[in-house]
């Protein structure tokens, strides 16, 4: 049964691929495996892959560069597999537009749950395009872009846009990281909330004067 479609794993350790294949196939996915970034990118050209799981430490071009190249042409969900927390810092620092991260060793079951969640979210976008105005920024859900007060057009990544839309449509409310994760990513992180912080940081960098406030001890808010 492969009714949920194809997930591409780019990972040089065969044991991880063998293990993940069992879990993904049980949940109705077809898992295809590439052992290098070059092979993974070539496999993506076939056009049937719904989400990519991407190891950072790869022979040849590394996962960071592979993610960048995917983002040049696609908004597909990308989940990075990192060996250490310090690699998370690297992804964060480079702001490569991944949707999510897991640190090895991770639970295969949880990884499957996250893939399902990012796919569900990426397909549940607002049907009727709407626009929001936030402090002079026009947020357009149809084009999934933001026009700055100066008229510049910014295209955040898919997840950054969903986060901005959620904050912007709940203006004035202090939203906890847990609420944001549930609404934007579709699951709870069992206390791991760094992904939200990373994406807020990216939005602040791209939309510099847009007022996303940190509410200490809670989470984030866009002033109403
Ligand atoms: Ca590796």
Image (cartoon, rainbow, N blue to C red):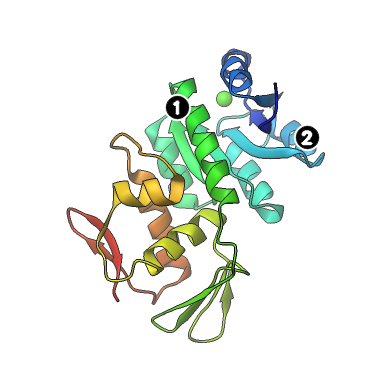
Residue 13 percent coordinates (x, y):
60, 18
Can residue 80 be seen here? The reply is no
Q: Quadrant of the C terminus?
A: bottom left
Q: Residue at x 47, y 38 (%)?
A: 101
Q: Which residue is mark 1?
A: 110
SS under mark 1? helix
Q: Determine the image quadrant of residue 16.
A: top right
Q: Nearer the viewer, residue 23 or 100?
A: 23
Image location of residue 29, percent across then percent down: 65, 27
Question: Residue furthest toward the front?
Answer: 128
> What is the crowding at mark 1: few (fewer than 14 residues within 10 Å), some, or many (at least 20)?
few
Q: Which residue is mark 2?
A: 43
Please tell me how crowded label 2 is: few (under 14), some (14-19), or many (20+) other residues with Cα within 10 Å: some
Give x and y (percent) for residue 74: 68, 52
Q: Quadrant of residue 215?
A: bottom left
Distance from mark 2 CB to nearest ligand 1 atom below 8 Å = no
Residue 212 figure quarter: bottom left
- Whether the residue carrying mark 1 lies under 8 Å from ligand 1 is answered with no
């Amino acid at each position: 049964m492969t009714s949920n479609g194809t997930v591409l794993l780019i990972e040089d350790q065969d044991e991880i691929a063998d293990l993940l294949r069992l879990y993904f196939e049980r949940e109705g996915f077809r898992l295809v495996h590439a052992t290098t970034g070059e092979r993974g990118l070539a496999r993506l050209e076939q056009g049937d892959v719904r989400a990519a799981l991407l190891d950072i430490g790869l022979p040849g071009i590394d996962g960071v560069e592979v993610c960048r190249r995917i983002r040049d042409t696609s908004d597909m969900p990308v989940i990075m597999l990192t060996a250490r927390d310090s690699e998370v810092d690297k992804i964060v620092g480079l702001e490569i537009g991944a949707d999510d991260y897991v640190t090895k060793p991770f639970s295969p079951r949880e990884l499957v749950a996250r893939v399902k969640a990012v796919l569900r979210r990426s397909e549940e976008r607002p049907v009727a395009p709407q626009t929001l105005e936030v402090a002079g920024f026009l947020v357009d859900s149809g084009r999934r872009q933001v026009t700055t007060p100066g008229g510049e057009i910014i295209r955040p990544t898919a997840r950054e846009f969903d986060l901005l839309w959620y904050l912007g449509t709940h203006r004035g409310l202090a939203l906890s990281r847990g609420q944001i994760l549930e609404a934007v990513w579709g699951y709870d992180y069992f206390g791991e909330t760094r992904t939200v912080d990373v994406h807020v940081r990216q939005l602040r960098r791209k939309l510099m004067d847009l007022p996303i406030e940190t509410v200490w001890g809670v989470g984030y808010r866009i002033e109403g």
